[in-house]
């Protein structure tokens, strides 16, 4: 468990639906205070949850919105910062035929913007806290033997690399850094054919985040706590 006298607090970015919404519900169930964000038009499902929930809005690709949220939360201390927001492009699109515009959208949303959030909010995270980002098993270079999902894979591999650079720049930082792979889960993004239900992934993913509390350095893990090869 994260330990502190006050209620544990997570800032969860990208919580309006799918895995982020389920993480919010699960943290609330476990007695945490959750500051959960949607985009301005996507907070309806969050509003149906109850518990120690604060709902904020941010589009992570818009630096002025990230800066505004940072200013609103200036006097907060958080135990876990977790950036879940992400997008994918059409599965059939390879690097050969993706448009430059679509490539930029996926890379800016999945690679650059989560790191901007990490950079902007990391000083609010307690010295024994955790900074996590939702990666994917698809981000593993080692495990890419079949190709497919090329642009999305590239965006998560880039995200992993940026977190490694962040970790290297903060080598003496006692906080835990996590890149999480939730498994292939049935959400809008994962689709109906995905292997796992949200219930099979998310409680386990939270257990893994919890189990790594206080373990400094960067860890690339799946929802069951298994190390994912880079
Ligand atoms: N499902 C899977 O099988 C799977 C597997 C591996 C990794 N992941 C990763 O897990 C994360 C969540 O996936 P999911 O399956 O829950 O996807 P999802 O159902 O499509 O939900 C995506 C979430 O990201 C938010 N988001 C997207 N662009 C954003 C932006 N510019 N600013 C702020 N929020 C933004 C969405 O907010 P809006 O509602 O406002 O659009 C939504 O809350 C993603 O990072 C994804 O890459 C998923």
Image (tube, rainbow, N blue to C red):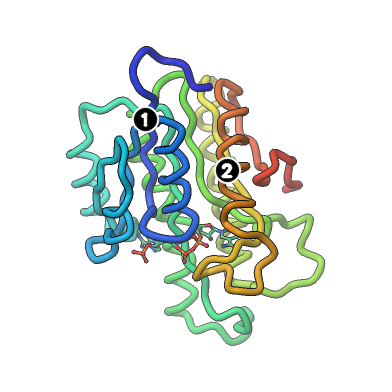
- Image: 56 above or below 27: below
Cα distance in 3D space between marks 2 and 1: 17 Å
Residue 41 location (% of width, % of height): 24, 66
- Numbered tag placed on residue 203 in the rendering: 2
Residue 149 location (% of width, % of height): 64, 73
Which residue of the protein is positioned furthest toward the top in this rendering?
Answer: 5
Q: Nearer the viewer, residue 65 or 184?
A: 184
Which residue is denoted by mark 1 in the rendering?
Answer: 9
Foreground mark, 2 or 1, reads 2
- Image: 203 above or below 136: above
* Residue at horizontal 65 percent and vertical 57 percent from the top: 139
Mark 1 Cβ and ligand 1 under 8 Å apart: no
Q: Is residue 67 left or right of residue 5?
A: left
Q: Is residue 4 left or right of residue 65?
A: right
What crowding class fits label 1: few (fewer than 14 Cα within 10 Å), some (14-19), or many (20 or more)?
many
Q: Is residue 225 left or right of residue 174?
A: right
Q: How many marks?
A: 2
Quarter of the image for residue 215 reads: top right
Residue 225 location (% of width, % of height): 69, 38
Q: Nearer the viewer, residue 174 or 55?
A: 55
* Residue at horizontal 43 percent and vertical 32 percent from the top: 80
Q: Nearer the viewer, residue 44 or 121?
A: 44
Residue 222 location (% of width, % of height): 67, 46
* Residue at horizontal 54 percent and vertical 83 percent from the top: 98
Q: Secondary structure at mark 1?
A: strand
* Residue at horizontal 70 percent and vertical 75 percent from the top: 148
Q: Are marks 2 and 1 in contact (CB under 8 Å)?
A: no
- Image: 148 above or below 13: below
Mark 2 Cβ and ligand 1 under 8 Å apart: no
Badge 2 or badge 1: first in the primary sequence:
1
């Amino acid at each position: 468990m994260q330990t502190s006298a006050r209620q544990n607090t997570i800032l969860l970015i990208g919580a309006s639906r799918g895995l982020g919404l389920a993480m919010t519900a699960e943290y609330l169930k476990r007695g945490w205070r959750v500051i959960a964000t949607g985009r301005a038009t996507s907070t309806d499902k969050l509003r149906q949850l109850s518990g120690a929930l604060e709902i904020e809005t941010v589009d992570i690709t818009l630096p002025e919105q990230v800066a505004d949220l940072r200013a609103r939360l200036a006097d907060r201390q958080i135990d876990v910062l977790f950036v879940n927001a992400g997008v994918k492009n059409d599965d059939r699109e390879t690097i050969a035929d993706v448009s430059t515009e679509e490539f930029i959208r996926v890379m800016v949303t999945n690679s650059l913007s989560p790191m901007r959030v990490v950079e902007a909010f990391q000083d609010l995270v307690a010295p024994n806290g955790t900074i996590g980002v939702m990666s994917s098993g698809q981000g593993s270079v080692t495990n890419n033997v079949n190709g497919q999902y090329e642009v999305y894979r590239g965006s998560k591999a880039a995200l992993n690399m940026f977190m490694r650079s962040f970790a290297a720049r903060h080598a003496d930082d006692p906080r835990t850094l996590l890149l999480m792979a939730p498994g292939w889960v049935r959400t809008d993004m994962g689709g109906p054919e995905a292997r796992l239900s949200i219930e099979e992934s998310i409680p386990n993913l939270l257990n893994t985040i919890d189990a790594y509390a206080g373990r400094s350095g960067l860890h690339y893990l799946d929802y069951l706590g298994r190390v994912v090869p880079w």
